[in-house]
Image: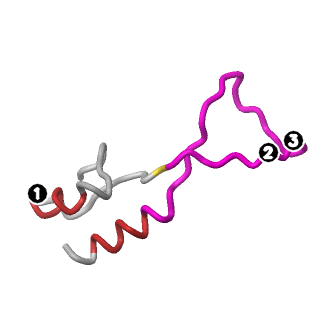
Amino acid sequence: MPGGGVNKENIKFILENTDAQEIHGSFKKVKDEAKDESSEIILSEKNIPLYVTDEDVVAEIVNILKTV
């Protein structure tokens, strides 16, 4: 199952040129930080970004998959 590096630019090529029936991807983006000091939780002393799934990219991927 293809996984690392799969993105909206190469997913169609991967599926059309391999025998892959499934793919894996996080399709992530850095989460926009809403600064609410009263609910802030510090997970680390380091300034490490928090990643979340990018819903817009997932929607684009779904549309691409419909054409393969």
> Which quarter of the picture shows residue 59?
bottom left
Q: Which mark is residue 35?
A: 2
Number of dots carrying numbers: 3
Residue 33 locus on image (x, y percent): 70, 46
- Type of amino acid under label 2: Lys
> Neighbour class for label 1 at 10 Å: few (<14), some, many (≥20)?
few
Could you tell me which secondary element the residue under label 2 belongs to? loop
Residue 17 locus on image (x, y percent): 9, 58
Question: What's drawn in magenta, residue-wise?
Answer: 29-57
- In the picture as drawn, the residue positioned furthest to the top comes out as 45
Label 3 and label 1: CA atoms lie apart by 49 Å
Residue lying at 81% horizontally and 41% vertically, measured from the top left: 40
* Mark in the foreground, 2 or 1: 2
- In the picture as drawn, the residue positioned furthest to the bottom comes out as 66
Residue lying at 43% horizontally and 64% vertically, measured from the top left: 58
Q: Which residue is mark 1?
A: 18
- What is the magenta segment's predominant secondary structure? loop
The answer to whether the residues at label 2 and label 3 have Cβ atoms under 8 Å apart is yes
- Type of amino acid under label 1: Thr
Label 2 and label 1: CA atoms lie apart by 45 Å
Reply above or below: 27 against 43. below
Q: Which mark is residue 37?
A: 3
- Of pointers 3 and 1, the one earlier in the residue sequence: 1
